[in-house]
Amino acid sequence: MITRRELYRKGRLTVSTKEKVQAISVEKDVQRLQLDKYRDALLYVPAHYSHDMPASLAVMLHGAGGQAEHGLDLIRAYGDKKNIILLSPASRAATWDIIVKSSFDADVIFIDTALSIVFDRFNIDKKRIGVGGFSDGASYALCIGLSNGDLFTHIIAFSPGFYTTVHTEGKPAVFISHGINDYILPIDPCSRRIVPKLKHKNYHVEYREFIGEHEIPAVISAAAVNWFTEDS
């Protein structure tokens, strides 16, 4: 019998969506999940969320040295218009476990716990569950998303550096963007290696290069959100 700890070591989440969620009154805008005193997870609930209309869900991950607020801000501007619930956990260390320890560990557990709260409280569109991030967060989004493609339908990776998996499941759609003048995570050894590798493994990849550095231009974030919410 495979234990939950063994699943976490493979980057696997144990949480699952609910067939029916009890309609309860929920707070709108930004709220803490109260899972950790110092490095908590933040939740953004769009202004027009209604239990009667399933919302998209995006788990957004910050870059190295970041906070939950940084992950939330990546696409927060589109939350209300596109009816996207945003979940942004903070990494347990300065960045994500696979980067710090070369193994999946506490961050997988923390994300699993945060997602279980979201699935218990909100009516989520099962065809629009994404994980995304910027820089180290983008790398980790690829790691977690590819490991859990039976849960995540979409992955949004803004300027990723790499990805690694112990186990893959499903075939989530992937959006990757990268600035051609990125001096922090140069495009050639990063996205220009990642994208062909994913395509060779038969993942559908939407790839956008742009003239810029280690950043997310508004036109790129808008394209990613439109892709996520409108992709069929």
Image: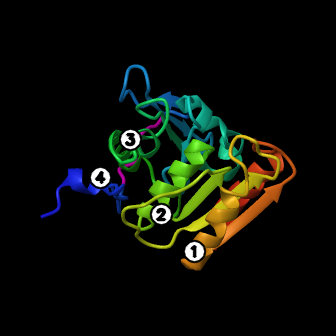
Residue flagged by tag 1: what amino acid is it? Tyr
Residue flagged by tag 3: what amino acid is it? Lys
Q: Circle 2 sits on which residue?
A: 146
Inspect the magenta stretch and tell me whether residue 87 lies in it: no
Label of residue 101 in the image: 3
Q: Circle 1 sits on which residue?
A: 203
Q: Circle 4 sits on which residue?
A: 9
Label of residue 47 in the image: none
Please say if the residues under marks 3 and 4 sit with CB atoms less than 8 Å apart.
no
In the rendered view, tell whether residue 55 sits above or below residue 76: below
Name the foreground residue: 167 vs 125: 167
Secondary structure state at the residue bearing disc 1: loop
Name the foreground residue: 93 vs 108: 93
Residue flagged by tag 4: what amino acid is it? Arg
Q: Quadrant of the C terminus?
A: bottom right
Q: CA distance from mark 2 to mark 3?
A: 19 Å
Secondary structure state at the residue bearing disc 3: loop
Judged left or right of residue 131, residue 101 is left
Please say if the residues under marks 1 and 2 sit with CB atoms less than 8 Å apart.
yes
Q: Which residues are magenta?
A: 21-26
Q: Residue furthest right?
A: 211
Judged left or right of residue 160, residue 140 is left
Residue flagged by tag 2: what amino acid is it? Leu
Q: Residue at x 52, y 57 (%)?
A: 163
User: What is the x, y in percent for residue 122?
Assistant: 44, 48
Q: Residue at x 62, y 75 (%)?
A: 199
